[in-house]
């Protein structure tokens, strides 16, 4: 039986097993001109709470994680100075990857759910490595028997796209000299700013290949006026990141 792709549905907190809680306050550098929490800032919160959870477990620091796919649903946007409670838990595993779900609830009513598929890699090589017994010890109970694949599902660009140059900034880079997991969402923020979309709805992001500093890239945006739209980061005709979004 084929496995469902990871990070394609939201699951409630497990009835048993590990959950990790943290708090954040939405700061000035996290918001757009309307004072709403940006998607790249949300992704950074998700990255931070996941890292804090792993550190709290004392997991092997020689191993790193790359986000293969994420989905964020905003039911009520977080705003400047709002206090957020974050709860994160693992909801599935694969050979070298784990699905992590995180909820964000705010003091002013913010309600955001997110799920990501994280691939474990060896930092020295950047290559995937099987999940350790230690990882299974901490997260296996919460995941139960649920298994997912790392298969991606977003379509590539059509011929009907707007294309503009996209520059990678040094502030976007991680220790591998690639655009980091959170900064990868910044191109979607650029699209949202140009389309005047609201902050309520769902966005998906898939990572196919890294982009290094100095590499010429293009941002392509479909011209379809339907509720669900797509955007891509493209290098020499190859998609490196794909996004789909639907905001009311």
Image (tube, helix red, strand yellow):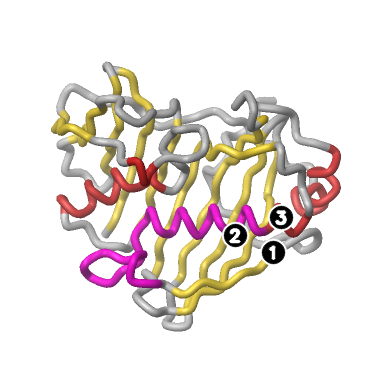
Which one is earlier in the sequence, the residue at label 2 or at label 3? Answer: 2
> Which residue is at 48% across, 79% downward?
83
Instruction: Where is residue 222? Give x, y as percent.
Output: 20, 35
> Which residue is at 61% across, 35% downward?
119
Which residue position is annotated with label 3? 55
Which residue position is annotated with label 2? 49
Instruction: Where is residue 200? Give x, y as percent.
Output: 33, 63
Observer-nearest residue: 62 or 150? 62
Question: Magenta stretch mostly in which secondary structure?
Answer: helix
What is the distance, in whole Å, between disc 1 and disc 3 at their CAs?
A: 11 Å
> Which quadrant is home to the N terminus?
top right
Which one is earlier in the sequence, the residue at label 2 or at label 1? Answer: 1
Q: Crowding near pointer 3: few (<14 within 10 Å), some, many (20+)?
A: few
Instruction: Where is residue 46? Give x, y as percent.
Output: 53, 56
> Which residue is at 62% across, 54% downward?
50
Which one is earlier in the sequence, the residue at label 1 or at label 3? Answer: 1
> Which residue is at 35% across, 39% downward?
243
Left or right: 40 with respect to 92? left
Observer-nearest residue: 142 or 234? 234
Magenta part of the chain: 27-52
Q: Is residue 102 above or below residue 99?
A: below
What is the distance, in whole Å, between disc 2 and disc 3 at their CAs?
A: 10 Å
| Dot 2 and dot 1 residues touching (CB under 8 Å) | yes
> Which quadrant is home to the C terminus?
bottom left
Q: Secondary structure at mark 2?
A: helix
Which residue position is annotated with label 1? 20
> Does residue 38 belong to the magenta stretch?
yes
> Does residue 62 belong to the magenta stretch?
no
């Amino acid at each position: 039986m084929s496995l469902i792709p990871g990070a394609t549905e939201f699951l409630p907190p497990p009835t048993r097993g590990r959950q990790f809680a943290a708090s954040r306050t939405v700061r000035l550098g996290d918001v757009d001109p309307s004072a709403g929490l940006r998607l790249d800032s949300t992704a950074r919160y998700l990255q931070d709470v996941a890292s804090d959870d792993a550190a709290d477990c004392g997991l092997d620091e020689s191993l790193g994680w790359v986000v293969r796919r994420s989905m964020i649903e905003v039911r009520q946007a977080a705003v400047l100075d709002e206090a957020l409670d974050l709860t994160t838990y693992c909801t599935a595993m694969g050979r070298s990857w784990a699905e992590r779900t995180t909820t964000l609830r705010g003091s002013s009513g913010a309600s955001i759910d997110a799920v990501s598929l994280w691939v474990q890699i060896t930092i020295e090589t950047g290559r995937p490595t099987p999940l350790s017994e230690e990882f299974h010890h901490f997260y296996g109970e919460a995941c139960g028997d649920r298994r997912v694949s790392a298969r991606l599902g977003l379509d590539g660009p059509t011929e009907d796209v707007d294309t503009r140059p996209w520059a990678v900034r040094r502030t976007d880079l991680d220790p591998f000299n690639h655009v980091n997991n959170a900064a990868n969402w910044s191109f979607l923020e650029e699209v949202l700013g140009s389309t005047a979309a609201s902050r309520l709805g769902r966005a998906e992001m898939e990572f196919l290949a890294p982009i290094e500093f100095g590499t010429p890239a293009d941002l392509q945006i479909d011209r379809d006026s339907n509720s669900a739209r797509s955007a891509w980061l493209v290098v020499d005709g190859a998609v490196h990141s794909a996004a789909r979004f639907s905001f009311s």
